[in-house]
Image: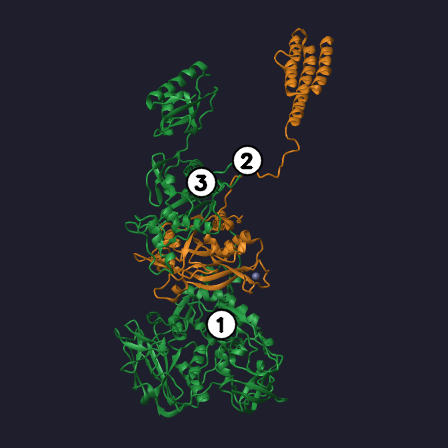
Chain colours: A green, B orange
């Protein structure tokens, strides 16, 4: 909401500078940013009068004028269609720099000299209007600076009004705030219109069919009107507020709305059709054309103003095309009504329209201010459009809305604020805000109906504290509350995971939780994603069901930027359908692709593969003190069926992983192999190893022996290791694979596996003979079990 | 006894010379074994001490041990010299890269979120969380958003199947925790929130929020200011100027937006603070009695405050990131810059 500073100053009587005004408003809840005037844009721009006008000898569309600026007469060429002799206009002389963009210079156009430029509103930066030159009121003083005459030396207050404060959607409302802040009395002057001999009841009657939706509808009749341009002072204020001036009648309704906050609507009485206003719900399928020319099919969510036969306005939202005020209008039916906020909100939504009126009605107008606003507009119509006001107001106040009275305990103000605010300050503040206050141990406060937000004691507490100033409330530096703050493992494990994975060189990525439906389904056709019903785009069409989606999205984004060597991870939720409600398990996902280790001059670097992934998972589970991870080949959606694994910690399945299905990777613009795994956090937590007592370090030395056997290809390393441990029994302290070899001299279809075995006894130092005996038994057993042959 | 001391003296002179002359590691090792080994000359001398008196043993033994230490040191030094001579002394190019060991980085949002959470945990706030897919009740109704009220327009909402929505703030955790607990309740609720807005440089349809709230028998706005001041001083720096602007949130009253002095321009006005000299960092207020009523707390007996801040916005201010989309594109060149 925009309001000129001068208007607020005039209504409130404050003497603060614009900056101080903005600061005070902001500090009391009406955020205000100033737009300062730009006098430099109006240098050499003066008021002039066209005293002579002739056709341009060489151009049909141009005229040559002589413009008198008091001390001189300037010859100026003009191309505007509305240019006429005798007009008072704004003349930019050579040296002017309009809007800081357009420098005016003497020019010669088709052989005729022009020493300036007659300006349109858009050229001055006043509005976007370029339909013609700006024509000033006849009494405009020639030779005066346009900047001063037009009142442009006036900052505009750009106000952010919170949805609970409809009263501040008006100059009077904001002025009241300023008066309270300055401790000044606030009593805006009010003058009822002089009335003619005509009676309003001869013109119109008002019937309200739905008094819930329309508690009050009032109307005035103004006759003998003459439509024309509004005086500059009204147009200037409308322009400063961001409204386009149209004609005096429309401008007056808009002006009074800006002044009082009460939306008004003027109907052309002669085209209204009947002598009655009927307010009712629209019927299903009822057609109606709003004044912007759009045709609507209505339903009963829309409240309709009718003439008893057909709709003439969508109540509180927009008037109809048929009865709009036009140049020929001489009699106006001026509507000033109060509509239910919820009804107008639904109506506006149904129509897909939002207007200055609906914005105010949705937030709540003042049911007891409607006649005053109508009177104010009627006064202006007599003054500025020659109107005569029919006697009386047609006022159907079907459902009275009365001010409420609330008790305020001063102690409550202090309890909530923590500030020692004095009772007289409370009383003065509330009175300043237009409330009636009866003193006593508890204050009895009657709240005017323009403050629909104040209905409870706490609302009064807020009024007092915000005027007192939140910055004035002391800062308490005590600590209080529960003695102890527990932490939860399902939170701390995420921190551990981040530490471990970043320590292993993984960069943390962050997805949005949302996904593209098709791509998400391609990753996992078995999980029907939860759909967003009013999504912005396909990209945010569903909730992700798999972390793999986000990992691939991040991977693709990087690869597109030539970051092809990646080790990334994400910790986050996926969203699944549950029995009763959605289920949001948390996962950690890792993705490896390219050669994330980079190159090393001492040796070759490895491309990511399944075994790098396995190593990462082993380190992660070790770091988290989980049962050791084991991988089992088993197809999993999203991964290549031949290279996908189920990941177990002990017996428990904790996740899945493998080489990402290449067809799916391509959906994310990835043409290189990616290895990924997704682990569920609750499963990881369940696999945490119980805390065990310390095992003493061995007292006796170990003996090492290597063992290389040639076995058939299908025999797994793990099978051989298991046998080594079984046969060797307690004496085998550890055994690990250190080499895998195929090809010459190993026969085709076979492989050589080399193990390093450590033998140790807890009781004594093992003699070489003893170790040889056990080692020999293992060799012999492997030979029988796997037809294994010792490799020399 | 003097004989033994003389012998030690001779051994010393001789061995010191021999060590200095030793030309190879092998010669040096032979020398070491010959003198200090199990069957070496010094060992033999020490064995001969058994015939001496206690006092003599002490004198000679001390001298012999001194000699042993001296010779050992000399041998070690000479060995280093010999080894150095045979290695690439002066030939190492130390500018060659070390073995590439990766070190990863937390995401900017995590870094800032952790910093925020850590400060509040130290003030006694416990972490809690709630679902991202919420009901209208927890996201709006229980927080005193009337149905069909313009206050709901301020938070454009994504709806999902099954009459649910994507939470527009983490404030719903308040209600869930109040239902589970009795005061005192002092909680911080971090998490993802969603707004149905077009994505541009300044706004995203997804961001993270940290909500904090404290309810006890006598909590006032003054206590809220204390907690927020402690946070601001810790996070943005001690003594940072703050201001409280009354505002409107349905679930708090009185409500306030909290601004800090723009730390980029010092308040003179710049692009980041939109020439206002202030940066808005969080919303806050005293929890509305309507919320307490919804969870069965007696607002005559307890009072409390709540506050909430956007993590991305705070992170962007701190690291002067000018495009929020960078945070969700996950370009590792961006992630790696975060410290
Ligand atoms: Zn700044």
- Measure how far apart labels 2 and 1 are at the Cα level: 76 Å
Q: Residue furthest left?
A: A284
- Picture coordinates of residue B154, whole percent (x, y): 41, 64
- Measure how far apart labels 3 and 1 are at the Cα level: 67 Å
* Element class at badge 2: loop
Examine the image and state in which quarter residue A43 appears.
Answer: bottom right
Q: Classify 10 Å Cα crowding around label 3: few (below 14), some (14-19), many (20 and above).
A: many
Label 3 C-beta lies within 8 Å of the nearest ligand 1 atom:
no
Q: Are marks 2 and 3 in contact (CB under 8 Å)?
A: no
- Whether residue A479 can be seen here: no
Q: Is residue B304 above or below residue A688?
A: below
| Residue beneath disc 3 | A608
| Residue beneath disc 1 | A177
Query: Which numbered disc, 2 or 1, marks the residue that appears first in the sequence?
Result: 1
- Specify the subunit that label 1 lies on: A
* Side of A708 relative to A27 (left or right): left
Q: Are marks 2 and 1 in contact (CB under 8 Å)?
A: no
Q: Is residue A327 above or below residue A642?
A: below
Query: Which numbered disc, 3 or 1, marks the residue that appears first in the sequence?
Result: 1
* Element class at badge 3: loop
User: Do discs 2 and 3 share a chain?
Assistant: yes
Q: Nearer the viewer, residue A451 or B7?
A: B7
Q: Classify 10 Å Cα crowding around label 2: few (below 14), some (14-19), many (20 and above).
A: few
Q: Are marks 3 and 1 in contact (CB under 8 Å)?
A: no
| Residue beneath disc 2 | A602
Q: Classify 10 Å Cα crowding around label 1: few (below 14), some (14-19), many (20 and above).
A: many
- Specify the subunit that label 3 lies on: A
Q: Nearer the viewer, residue A413 or A290?
A: A290
Q: Nearer the viewer, residue A164 or A616?
A: A616
State which quarter of the image contains the C terminus of chain A: top left
Q: Is residue A628 above or below residue A394?
A: above
């Amino acid at each position: 909401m925009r309001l000129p500073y001068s208007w607020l100053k005039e209504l409130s009587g404050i003497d603060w500078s614009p900056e101080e005004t903005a600061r005070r408003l902001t500090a009391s809840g009406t955020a205000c940013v100033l737009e300062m005037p730009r006098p430099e844009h109006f240098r050499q721009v003066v008021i002039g009068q066209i005293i002579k006008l002739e056709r341009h000898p060489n151009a049909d569309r141009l005229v040559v004028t002589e413009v008198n600026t008091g001390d001189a007469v300037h010859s100026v060429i003009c191309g505007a269609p509305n240019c006429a002799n005798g007009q008072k206009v704004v003349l930019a002389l050579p040296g002017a720099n309009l809007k800081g963009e357009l420098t005016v210079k003497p020019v010669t156009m088709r052989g005729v000299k022009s020493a300036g430029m007659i300006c349109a509103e858009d050229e001055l930066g006043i509005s976007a209007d370029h339909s013609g030159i700006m024509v000033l009121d006849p009494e405009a003083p020639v030779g005066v600076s346009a900047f001063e005459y037009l009142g442009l030396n006036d900052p505009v207050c750009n106000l952010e009004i919170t949805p609970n404060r409809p009263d501040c959607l008006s100059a009077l409302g904001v002025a009241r705030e300023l008066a309270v802040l300055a401790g000044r009395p606030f009593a805006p002057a009010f003058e009822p219109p002089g009335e003619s001999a005509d009676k309003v009841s001869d013109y119109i009657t008002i019937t309200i069919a739905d008094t819930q939706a329309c508690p009050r509808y009032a109307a005035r009749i103004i006759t003998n009107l003459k439509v024309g341009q509004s005086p500059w002072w009204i147009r200037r204020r409308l322009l400063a507020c961001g409204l386009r001036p149209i004609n005096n009648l429309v401008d007056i309704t808009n002006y009074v709305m800006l002044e009082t906050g009460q939306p008004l609507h003027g109907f052309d009485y002669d085209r209204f059709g009947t002598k009655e206003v009927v307010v009712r719900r629209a019927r299903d399928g009822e057609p109606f054309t709003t004044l912007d020319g759009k045709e609507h099919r209505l339903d009963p969510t829309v409240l309709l103003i009718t003439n008893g036969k057909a709709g003439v306005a969508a109540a509180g939202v927009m008037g109809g095309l048929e009865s709009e005020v036009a140049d020929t209008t001489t009699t106006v039916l001026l509507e000033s009504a109060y509509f239910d906020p919820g009804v107008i909100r639904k109506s506006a939504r149904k129509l897909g329209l939002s207007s200055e009126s609906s914005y105010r009605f949705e937030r709540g107008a003042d049911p007891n201010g409607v006649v005053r606003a109508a009177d104010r507009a009627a006064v202006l119509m007599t003054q500025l459009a020659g109107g005569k006001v029919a006697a009386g107001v047609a006022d159907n106040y079907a459902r009275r809305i009365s001010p409420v009275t609330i008790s305020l305990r001063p102690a409550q103000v202090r309890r909530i604020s923590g500030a020692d605010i004095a009772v007289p300050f409370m009383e003065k503040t509330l009175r300043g805000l237009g409330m009636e206050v009866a003193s006593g141990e508890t204050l009895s406060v009657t709240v005017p109906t323009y403050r629909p937000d104040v209905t409870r004691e706490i609302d009064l507490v807020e009024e007092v504290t915000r005027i007192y100033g939140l910055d004035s409330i002391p800062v308490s530096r005590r600590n209080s509350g529960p003695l102890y703050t527990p932490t939860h493992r399902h939170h701390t494990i995420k921190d551990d995971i981040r530490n471990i994975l970043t320590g292993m060189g993984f960069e943390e990525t962050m997805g949005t939780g949302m996904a593209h439906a098709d791509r998400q389904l391609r990753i996992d056709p078995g999980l029907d994603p939860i759909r967003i019903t009013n999504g912005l785009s396909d990209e945010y069409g569903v909730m992700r069901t798999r972390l793999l989606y986000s990992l691939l999205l991040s991977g693709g984004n990087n690869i597109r930027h030539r970051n092809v060597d990646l080790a990334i991870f994400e910790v986050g939720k996926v969203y699944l359908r549950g029995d009763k409600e959605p289920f949001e398990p948390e996962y950690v996902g890792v993705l490896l692709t390219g050669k994330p280790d980079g190159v090393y001059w001492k040796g070759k670097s490895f491309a990511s593969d399944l075994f790098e992934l396995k190593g990462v998972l082993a380190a992660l589970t070790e770091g988290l003190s989980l049962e050791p991870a084991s991988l089992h080949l088993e197809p999993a959606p999203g991964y290549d069926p031949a290279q996908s694994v189920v990941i177990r910690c002990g017996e428990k399945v904790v996740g899945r992983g493998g080489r990402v299905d290449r067809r799916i990777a391509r959906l994310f613009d990835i043409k290189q192999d990616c290895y990924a795994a997704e682990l569920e956090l609750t499963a990881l937590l369940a696999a945490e190893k119980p805390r065990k007592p310390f095992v003493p370090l061995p007292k006796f030395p170990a003996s090492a022996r290597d063992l290389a056997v040639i076995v058939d290809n299908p025999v797994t390393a793990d099978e051989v290791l298991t046998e080594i441990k079984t046969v060797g029994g307690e004496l085998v302290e550890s055994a690990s694979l250190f080499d895998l070899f195929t090809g010459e001299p190993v026969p085709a279809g076979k492989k050589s596996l080399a193990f390093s075995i450590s033998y140790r006894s807890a009781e004594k130092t093992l003699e070489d003979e003893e170790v040889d005996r056990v080692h020999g038994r293992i060799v012999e057993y492997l030979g029988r079990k796997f037809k294994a042959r010792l490799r020399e | 006894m003097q004989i033994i001391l003389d012998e030690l003296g001779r051994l010393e002179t001789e061995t010191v010379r021999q060590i200095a002359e030793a030309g190879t590691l092998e010669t040096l090792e032979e020398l070491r074994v010959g003198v200090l080994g199990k069957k070496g000359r010094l060992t033999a001398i020490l064995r001969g001490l058994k015939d001496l008196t206690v006092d003599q043993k002490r004198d000679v033994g001390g001298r012999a041990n001194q000699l042993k230490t001296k010779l050992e040191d000399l041998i070690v030094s000479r060995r280093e010299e010999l080894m150095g001579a045979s290695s690439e002394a002066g030939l190492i190019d130390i500018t060659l890269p070390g073995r590439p060991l990766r070190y990863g980085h937390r995401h900017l949002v995590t870094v800032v979120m952790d910093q925020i959470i850590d400060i509040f945990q130290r003030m006694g706030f416990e972490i809690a969380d709630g679902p991202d897919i919420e009901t209208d009740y927890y996201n709006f109704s229980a927080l005193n958003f009337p149905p069909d009220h313009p206050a709901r327009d301020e938070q454009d909402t994504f709806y999902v199947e099954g009459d649910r929505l994507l939470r527009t703030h983490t404030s719903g955790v308040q209600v869930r925790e109040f239902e589970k607990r009795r005061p005192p309740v002092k909680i911080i609720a971090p998490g993802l929130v969603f707004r149905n807005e077009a994505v541009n440089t300044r706004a995203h349809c997804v961001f993270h929020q940290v909500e904090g709230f404290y309810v006890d028998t006598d909590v006032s706005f003054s206590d809220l200011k204390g907690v927020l001041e402690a946070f601001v001083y810790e996070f943005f720096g001690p003594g940072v100027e703050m201001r409280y602007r009354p505002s409107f949130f349905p679930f708090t009253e009185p409500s306030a937006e909290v601004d800090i002095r723009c730390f980029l321009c010092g308040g003179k006005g710049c692009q980041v603070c939109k020439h206002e000299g202030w940066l808005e960092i969080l919303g806050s207020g005293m929890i509305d009695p309507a919320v307490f009523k919804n969870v069965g707390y007696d607002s005559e007996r307890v009072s409390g405050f709540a506050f909430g801040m956007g993590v991305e916005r705070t992170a962007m201010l701190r690291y002067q990131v000018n495009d929020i989309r960078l945070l969700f594109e996950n370009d590792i060149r961006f992630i790696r810059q975060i410290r």
